[in-house]
Image (cartoon, rainbow, N blue to C red):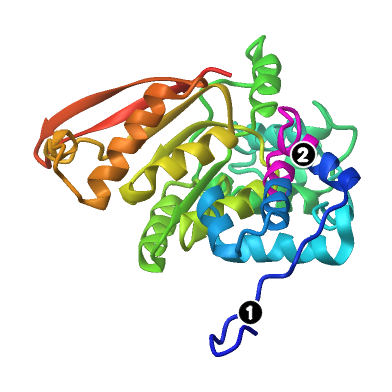
Amino acid sequence: MTEGSGRCAAVPVVLDEETRGALLRIASSAKAQVRQVLRAQIVLAAAGGAGNAAIARRLAVGVNTVRKWRGRFAERGLEGPKDAARSGRPRRYDDLVRVAVVAAATGIPPGPAATWTQTTIAAQVAGTVSPAISASQVGRIMAGLALKPHKVRGWLTRRDTPDFWDRVRDISTRALRVASVEYRAKHAEVATRNIARAGLDGIVQMRVGPALESLPELADEDPAPFDLVFIDADTGNDTHYVEWALRLTRAGSLIVVDIVVQQGRVADADSTSPDVLGSRAAIELIGSHPRLAGTALQTVGSKGHDGFALARVLG
């Protein structure tokens, strides 16, 4: 503890030349995983004498994230920032099998049955893309997707369409996932109910709390690059969110930043509002960043005069 402050002192980090070189290579690598780059940047900043709060502000992460990886490096060296081996059995069935389960459950059941059962779905899947799958495994897949066959009216494309499985393979390689971050629990509860009502709770992951603390945790999971990022509400931190969006997307992805006009206040050069300054900085970042091409659009409607910025990731 620091004397009289009640706060924990930052763990000291000392690097030899070999270790520093290894961390610099990771931090500057275009091929390294996002989470590994971030952890290397944290350790390098810590070795440079920066405090946890200063590093958190510089890298747009939570202080707890900085404290965690700084401490792990101090304990284990270069092994500290690495991911621990995950326990549990590897997944036996790939995305194509999961889509086959969905295709069966949303199709017309074999007569004279009026609805599918887990057993009949397992038999159907075994005859298409999987040599064998148990009824209980079918049940787990459907539960994970919140799929209820008796409530489904059907798919837009039937299994007997000639190119059905080619389309399925294309979809399964780009399995849809949505990550949403809500600052307030009550808003997350409302969103969760609406998502479940739409039957999408199997693909939407809801996180609650400050986004600048949740985003490093999301990066730690090494998700596939996002195709679309929508940034809303916390305009004072928009530049941090755009930077995080760049870390979590790929060439061709779209980044949308909402509430950037604010009744025209964004054009007021004398404004000192953190929200206005945040929106203006985000627009300037999009305009100057070598990996982004974008524009800002004004909107006028029942909610007043506002607008959004739209950016495409170039590479």
**Residue 124 in sight here:** no
User: Relative to the observer, which residue lies in front, 165 or 20?
Assistant: 20
First along the sequence among labels 1 and 2:
1
- Whether residue 279 sits left or right of residue 42 in the image: it is left
Q: Mark 2 points at which residue?
A: 24
**Location of the C terminus (image quadrant):** top right
Is the residue 79 above or below the residue 245 in the image?
Answer: below
Q: How many labels does the image show?
A: 2
The x, y position of residue 19, in whole percent, is 87, 47
Which amino acid type is shown beneath numbered disc 1? Cys
Residue 230 falls in which quadrant of the image?
top left
Residue at image location 61% in from the left, 47% down from the top? 145
The x, y position of residue 187, in whole percent, is 36, 61
**Location of the N terminus (image quadrant):** bottom right
Q: Residue furthest bottom?
A: 4
User: Relative to the observer, which residue lies in front, 119 or 49?
Assistant: 49
* Residue 181 among magenta residues: no
Q: Give the range drawn in magenta.
A: 24-39
The x, y position of residue 281, in whole percent, is 33, 37
The disc placed on residue 21 is none
Q: Name the residue under label 1.
A: 8
* Residue 32 among magenta residues: yes
The x, y position of residue 166, in whole percent, is 70, 15
Residue at image location 54% in from the left, 63% down from the top? 53
